[in-house]
Amino acid sequence: MTRTDVFLAEMRVEFPTFRIAKKRTSALQRAIHVALAVITLGGQRVYLTRYHTVLFGVLWVPDAWDAMSDDDRYVLLRHERVHLRQRKRMGDVLMAFVYLVPFFPLFLAYGRARIEWEAYVETIRATAEVHGLEAAASLRRHIVERFTGPEYGWMWPFPRAVNRWFDEALADVRAEHGGEV
Ligand SMILES: [Zn+2]
């Protein structure tokens, strides 16, 4: 069994109805893709090809899923499990509200930024486990761009703040690894 298969089996104990589906097979997902491209003025055009999205307990995977390595899928599932737990904790209505409403759907979406940040901390932790601390540290630019750029609707366009969050998360992960560099 691959690392992904083992982890998926573990996830299904916690979330028995969890399943993975292809975005391209869903009319709703294709509609979301078009809507996102429009409201971000073309800033988000890769929803169908590169983005993974958990919606009502289903992980919608993009075209890129097929080409991902076992390790990359595992790291991604660790991130998505955080969203499934958030959904359990908050419920669909509250989670959708926090994710979409405060402050605005575009620009300064603090609720969305905090929900995503919790999941990205897990991405950093899982990357350190699989590829080492060096690889985890090198996620910085990619993650800061996601928070401050158009792909998530400029949800928290303050690079200094996101860099500080990253420093804190990396320090925690380092400590979990016994402080080795
Ligand atoms: Zn996420």
Image: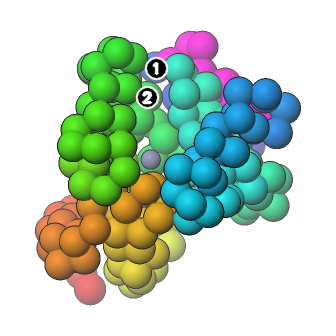
Q: Residues within 10 Å of mark 1 (few under 14, many from 20)?
A: few
Residue 39 place in picture, x, y as percent:
53, 50
- Asked if 94 appears above or below 44 in the picture, the reply is above
In this view, 161 is above or below 156? below
Res 95 quadrant in image: top left
Tell me the quarter of the picture where residue 104 sits: top left
Q: Secondary structure at mark 1?
A: helix
Q: Which residue is mark 2?
A: 84
Q: Residue at horizontal 69%, vertical 45%?
A: 34
Tell me if I can see residue 74 in this picture. Answer: no
- Structure colour scheme: rainbow
Magenta part of the protein: which range?
A: 15-22
Seen at 68% across and 59% down, the residue is 46
Q: Quadrant of the C terminus?
A: bottom left
x, y percent for residue 50: 68, 58
> In the shown orientation, is residue 44 left or right of residue 179?
right
Q: Of the residues shown, which amino acid type is indicated by label 2?
A: Leu
Q: Could you tell me if the residues under marks 2 and 1 are in contact, i.e. CB atoms within 8 Å? A: yes
Which-is-in-front pick, marks 2 and 1? 2
User: Of callouts 2 and 1, which one flags the residue occurring earlier in the amino acid sequence?
Assistant: 1
Q: Within the magenta stretch, is there residue 129?
A: no
SS at mark 2 in the image: helix
- How crowded pointer 2 is (Cα within 10 Å; few <14, some 14-19, many 20+) is rated as many
Report, in whole angstroms, how far the alpha carbon at label 2 lies from the one at label 1: 10 Å
Residue under label 1: 14
Mark yes or no: residue 35 visible: yes
